[in-house]
Image (cartoon, helix red, strand yellow):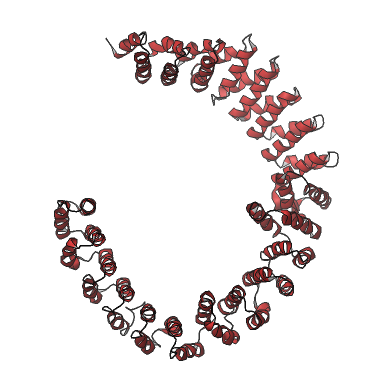
Amino acid sequence: MTDCSKVLEELKSDDNEIVREAAFQAGELGCADAVPLLADLLKSNHLGLQEAADHALRSIGGKSVVQAVVPLLRSDDAPARNLSMDILREVGAQDFPSLVDLVHDDDADIRIFATDILGSTDSFMAVEPLCDALLKDPEVNVRYQAAVSLGDLANPAAARCLNKAMLDDEWVQYAVIEALAKIKHSSSVDALVKALNSSSDLVASMIVDALGEVGNIKAVTMLLRHLDKSPTALRNKIVKAIVGILGGKSLKLLSASEREKLREYMLIALKDEDHEVQDAAITGLSFVGGEKATAEVLNIACELDHDRDRDRLANIIEDMSNLSFNSSMVDALNCGNMKKASLAVQLLSHLEGEDVSDALMNAFEGGDRNIKREILEALLEIAGDEAKEFFENILKNEQDGSMLKSTIHFLGLKLKDLKAIDGIFALLDHPYDDVKEAALDACVAIGGDEINQRFVNLFESDEAIDRLMAVFAMGKLDAQANIEYIRMALEDELPDVRKIALEALHDCGSHAESLPLVISRLHDENRDVRLTVVELLGSCYKDEVIPYIIQALQDDDDWVQIRAAEALGEHREESALPQLITMLDSPNKLVAIKVVEVLGTIGGTMAFQALLEASNGDANPELVQAAEEAILRIQEEQGEGD
């Protein structure tokens, strides 16, 4: 008995579990002879049998499945009918004639089912019967479904019949418009615009939305003609569609009269309840608007919630930054409403020019603390030499840490203003660390012998923080010229100063004096200092530093050992293998596992043998697993025999 024969016998069993399993097997084996029995199972009240039959029929497919399932469309049993619909949506295209016959059935419900199924076939062959149903079927719901299905197919060949159907019942028009929007065929533009003249407000609104989605530029002229004769709500939709089709920049290509008309209607559209319409008007006005548009849009933005509407506010500011600087921006900046003033600052921070800088500087004194901070941040981004004196006065007169940081960045990092050095250097004593750091970075950015000498003098301070800043700056300004001070700093009583001094020697391989100084702290009493030494030696890796990194493997601190092992592994240092292998017995599990990883990176016979031995241990399962992974890596990269 063949497998399919056995399946056929089991499908006739009285045991539901046997039948269910047989149904699944029928699908797996592709048993076409089982199709009638499987189709009959779709009418079962047993969900498991329905599921198995459904799966099998989809798997088998073909003409026999289509013809077996089609009769179930007439079933009074809703679950069976729905299952047959779903199956035909997937495999119906494998017997198109059967589906097309259903389009001409006497039963309107069957015709609706057929047009629905054809929309799921993703086939060009479905277009003609669906168009036939759309234009000729006497039942409105059949025509409606045919239009929906043509939209699902999204085949340009359907545009012709869909255009004709624009004269149909309003219910059908809804589906036709949505279908045309999906197809986006240029021939549909004329049909859609023509229908505007005779459509209800709802249909007209859908047509305008569809024209916006189609995005064909030839619709713009016709939509512009409808602006004057359309009610406000529809006109606002037309504004949205025009902006969507052209985009903001292309609005400038319209004639002066068209541009002016559109500007006025966009201002009206700002009051629409639909945020999408509002935003489209804002986008358009950001290219063809002016002072009035700026004022109106800022009023809208001022009413939005900073947290809930964050993204929308950001988009509005970005859009409006396309406008030129104007008096409405200045008015908002000085209006006394701090929320609106803040929006104006954000907008101006996207613009450029001395007039923008002047407006911000003039508004500074009238703002509260937050506005002042925002103004300085904006000027930091957009201003140049014209704001130097303004910032120099801020440096003298303001105490707020955030304002001082903006000022320091502008004068020090942006302009490198040597005239401001006294005020900036004095801020190294500021109580806030972030202000200190900003001042230190600014001094380094300005640079020069005079500033270097200031830090040389500061190095004599009894305050550890002063010495730390001095060493940092001298290392950045000219480490080699300041080498004697760095040498002294390496003996400082404060570990942080010694660490910063080492970091000043980051190019330890470039100068003869640097490397010995780095090595001199290899046995520093402080763990962080020793870690810095190992990291520096790893970064300037060469033959003379290798013995010192290997020496660091014996450090008392586990993390120093780990960093040394990582440096040796990164450079595949085979001479370190004997020392590394002894560390497999480290009492610190993390150290031992790190060494295993490094041995896998370095590779070679010695590492391979050591890892084999480690993988045979049973004291530490994590170590064994790491060793096995390292062995695999060596085998993949170097071969088992290496």
Above-or-below relation of 620 to 560: above
Residue 125 percent coordinates (x, y)? 56, 22
Residue sitting at x 71%, y 46%: 275
Q: Position of residue 405 (x, y in %)?
A: 58, 75
Near-viewer residue (467 or 514): 467
- The residue at the point 78 percent across, 59 percent down is 295
Quarter holding the C terminus is bottom left
Which percent across, then down, holds residue 206? 73, 34
Camera sees residue 164: no
Q: Horizontally, is 100 left or right of 457 in the view?
A: right
The reply to whether residue 28 is in sight is: yes
Q: Is residue 157 above or below residue 349?
A: above
Comparing 529 with 455, the one in front is: 529
Left or right relative to 284: residue 56: left
Frontmost residue, 158 versus 348: 348
Give the image location of residue 120, x and y in percent.
Answer: 55, 24
* Res. 187 image quadrant: top right
